[in-house]
Amino acid sequence: MAIIDLTFDQKRKLYSLPVLLSNKSMHGRANAFGKSTDSAWYSTIMYLDTGSNLTSITENEVDKLNLDRSTFQTQRVGGIGGFIDLLTTTEVGIKLMSNGNSMLDVKLDIIGVHENQIKKKIRKKTGAYVQRGNEVMEMICLFGLDALEKLGGKLEIDMKNKSGRIII
């Protein structure tokens, strides 16, 4: 049995987990120094999103993984804000570290790619004042239901103690 501990991020009010990402198209190729790139994994944090059917990364991860954007496809996806056309890729590998120090592959067919930030013009009236300008929200990497289903594990969340884990 493998256990993946989740960490509660107080700032975002979300559960997170460390992951390793890789560019699948680079597996087995030699880099500029003649070394195999099988171990070219990038460490990052993903946030658990049980409302998302599609795991996604930001453009920051795309750049760090040197993904070829010309291979991206567009897929229409729905969310709280309605439907959007989202870029997707099949070239991202995901690995998780369990408590037993074993690496678990999450074999996803497709990963979403979204902007690093979302900007929106705002106009808010608060009393006699009107606030105008831009509101900016930083985007994060999301670990969706598709990834949980591929793992075949059980999600346990303890809201009172702000702890959680995935048991496989």
Image (cartoon, rainbow, N blue to C red):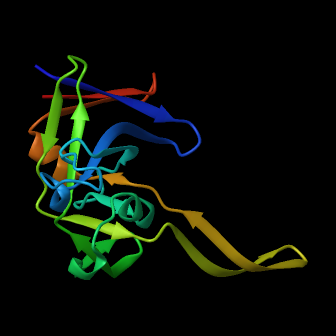
Percent x, y of residue 96: 24, 36
Q: Residue at x 54, y 46 (%)?
A: 12
Percent x, y of residue 85: 31, 83
Q: How many marks?
A: 0
Q: Quadrant of residue 56?
A: bottom left
| Horizontal relation, residue 63 to residue 52: left or right | right
Q: Residue at x 25, y 54 (%)?
A: 31
Percent x, y of residue 80: 38, 69
- When the figure is inspected, residue 17 is found, relative to residue 36, above or below; the finding is above
Percent x, y of residue 78: 29, 74
Image quadrant occupied by the N terminus: top left
Image quadrant occupied by the C terminus: top left
- When the figure is inspected, residue 164 is found, relative to residue 30, above or below; the finding is above
Q: Residue at x 22, y 69 (%)?
A: 89
Which one is in front, 61 or 85? 61
The residue positioned farthest toward the front in the image shown: 33
| Horizontal relation, residue 137 to residue 69: left or right | right
Q: Residue at x 34, y 81 (%)?
A: 84
Q: Quadrant of residue 148?
A: top left
| Horizontal relation, residue 167 to residue 80: left or right | left
Which one is in front, 135 or 115? 115
